[in-house]
Amino acid sequence: KEMPPKKKPYQKPEINIIDL
Amino acid sequence: MTNKKIDMNKLSDASEKIWRPSAHVVMRRIAGETILVPVSGNLANMQRLFTLNEMGALVWAMMEGGNTVGDIKEAIAGEFEVEQIRSESDLMEFIDQLAGSGLIQEQIA
């Protein structure tokens, strides 16, 4: 049986603000 | 722990929208970090910088390619192990943050 391609672990998209 | 209420109408309405990176922002990958630098004229405004994590950089790249929000949702659902409702609400939150910081603009057809 062909295995479905394994999905990558999910990571929440995030933005980090650097206030210089 | 807070439970966020998700407006399903808002999620579906947003699918056809196209968000583009602002012309006043340049993206650079430096030492594995994705950095967004606001520019005005030819000068970088170094007072406020933004960094994106890996998933954020992936979404940004898809926005650069002119993909709709729906396209981005599908790409995430197809490639990553995540419940659709969670990835959609995370994506909308991320888009709100980018738009709120003036980093992206909605493309009007």
Image: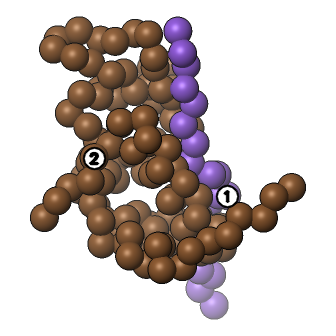
Chain colours: A purple, B brown
Q: Residue A9 carries which label?
A: 1
Look at 17% across and 59% down and name the residue there. Answer: B108
- Res. B55 visible in picture: no
Q: Where is residue B15 in the image (x, y as percent from the top left)?
A: 37, 72
Q: Image check: B12 left or right of A3?
A: left
Look at 30% across and 72% down and name the residue there. Answer: B16
- Res. B100 visible in picture: yes
Looking at the image, residue B48 lies above or below residue B109: above
Looking at the image, residue B77 lies above or below residue A12: below
Q: Where is residue B107 in the image (x, y as percent from the top left)?
A: 20, 55
Look at 30% across and 65% down and name the residue there. Answer: B17
Looking at the rendered structure, the secondary structure element under dot 2 is strand
Look at 47% across and 50% down and name the residue there. Answer: B96
Instruction: Read off the chain for label 1.
Output: A
The quarter of the image holding the N terminus of chain A is bottom right
Which residue of the protein is positioned furthest toward the right in this rendering?
A: B1
- In this view of the protein, which residue sits in the foreground, B61 or B44? B44
Disc 2 marks which residue?
Answer: B105
- In this view of the protein, which residue sits in the foreground, B25 or B54? B25
Which residue of the protein is positioned furthest toward the bottom in this rendering?
A: A1
Instruction: Read off the chain for label 2.
Output: B
Q: Which mark is residue B18?
A: none
